[in-house]
């Protein structure tokens, strides 16, 4: 719950995603402008969408990403969610469901995957690093970009008066000790394929049966061929 999370991760997340989160309100007028721009300008996305919109976007797995239908659903549901739920509920939901990459869903999972510690033990440097991370820009896969994201979060925290420039400088310069890529996670067999299978099962049977039904799943994965493909991709990259 939100009251179980340290204030630093809450502040850092807001600084990274929507600095005016506590006072902003989702505007249907702005949503209409955004939808018009999306349909007329090669489906371009706004640089800084509201946090409630990011939350809804994370949940929209039932429609084709990048489609006009998906964008319309996203904007209408964002407006509805902003009207139905408090700021605290939206932030709590986002922090528990956002995908930080490497199979880490939610900030607690991200803290354990990337830093091998619970979120309550994170330092300022670590909270800023995770708050600025995304599924494609994270400390494991893109460390340089993740570092830039950390610095941006710290700069915003200084601008909003939540930390001092000296604290930001100290957090920028202290090295963050990343967790070793846990063997169990690294040895997850074909994680992208497994995620695809999970998605297909959820679409067919629903999340409740998938999570609690005790299903045994047999797939078409050719493990030897998959290993060769991963090796070839790794060499090329």
Image: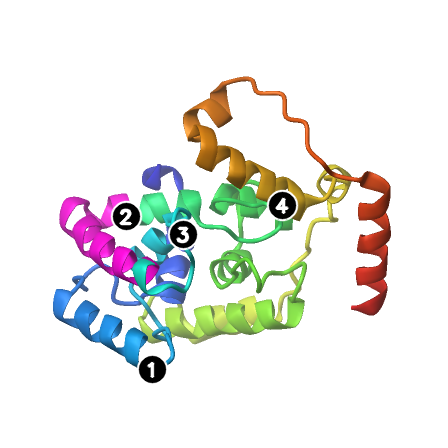
Which image quadrant: the N terminus? top left
Q: Mark 4 points at which residue?
A: 113
Q: Which of marks 1 and 2 is nearer the N terminus?
A: 1
Q: Is residue 216 left or right of residue 134?
A: right
How crowded pointer 1 is (Cα within 10 Å; few <14, some 14-19, many 20+) is rated as: few
Res 6 seen here: no
Q: Residue at x 24, y 55 (%)?
A: 78
Distance CA(mark 3)–CA(mark 2)? 13 Å
Percent position of residue 25, x then y: 16, 62
Residue ID for mark 2: 90
In this rendering, which labeled residue sits more in front, label 3 or label 2? Answer: 3
Measure the alpha-carbon separation of dots 1 and 2.
Answer: 30 Å
Mark linked to residue 176: none
Residue where numbered disc 1 is placed: 41
Going 68% across and 56% down the picture, which residue do you hit?
177
Q: Where is residue 54 in the image (x, y as percent from the top left)?
A: 35, 58
Cα gap from disc 3 to disc 4, whole angstroms: 20 Å
Q: Give the range drawn in magenta.
A: 70-89
Q: Find residue 179 and report its horizontal and vertical position in percent.
A: 70, 49
Disc 3 versus disc 4: nearer the observer: 3
Disc 3 residue crowd, few under 14, some 14–19, many 20+, Cα 10 Å: some
What residue is pinned by disc 3?
Answer: 58
| Callout 3: SS | helix
| Mark 4 residue element | helix
Residue depicted at 48% across the width and 68% down the height: 167
């Amino acid at each position: 719950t939100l009251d179980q999370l340290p204030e630093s991760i809450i502040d850092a997340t807001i600084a990274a995603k929507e600095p005016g989160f506590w006072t902003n309100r989702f505007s249907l007028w702005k949503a209409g402008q955004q939808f018009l721009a999306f349909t007329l300008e090669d489906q371009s996305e706004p640089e800084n969408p509201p946090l409630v919109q990011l939350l809804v976007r994370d949940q929209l797995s039932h429609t084709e990403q990048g489609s006009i239908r998906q964008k319309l659903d996203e904007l209408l549901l964002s407006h509805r969610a902003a009207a139905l739920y408090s700021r605290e509920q939206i932030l709590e939901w986002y922090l528990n469901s956002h995908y930080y990459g490497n199979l880490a869903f939610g900030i607690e999972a991200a803290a354990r995957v990337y830093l091998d510690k619970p979120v309550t033990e994170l330092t300022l440097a670590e909270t800023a690093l995770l708050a600025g991370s995304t599924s494609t820009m994270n400390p494991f896969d893109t460390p340089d970009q993740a570092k830039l994201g950390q610095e941006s979060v710290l700069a915003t925290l200084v601008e909003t008066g939540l930390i001092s420039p000296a604290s930001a400088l100290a957090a920028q310069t202290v090295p963050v000790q990343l967790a070793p890529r846990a063997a169990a996670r690294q040895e997850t067999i074909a994680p992208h394929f497994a995620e695809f299978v999970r998605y297909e099962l959820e679409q067919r049977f629903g999340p409740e049966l998938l999570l609690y039904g005790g299903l045994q799943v047999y797939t078409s994965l050719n493990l030897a061929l998959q290993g060769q493909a991963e090796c070839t991709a790794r060499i090329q990259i």
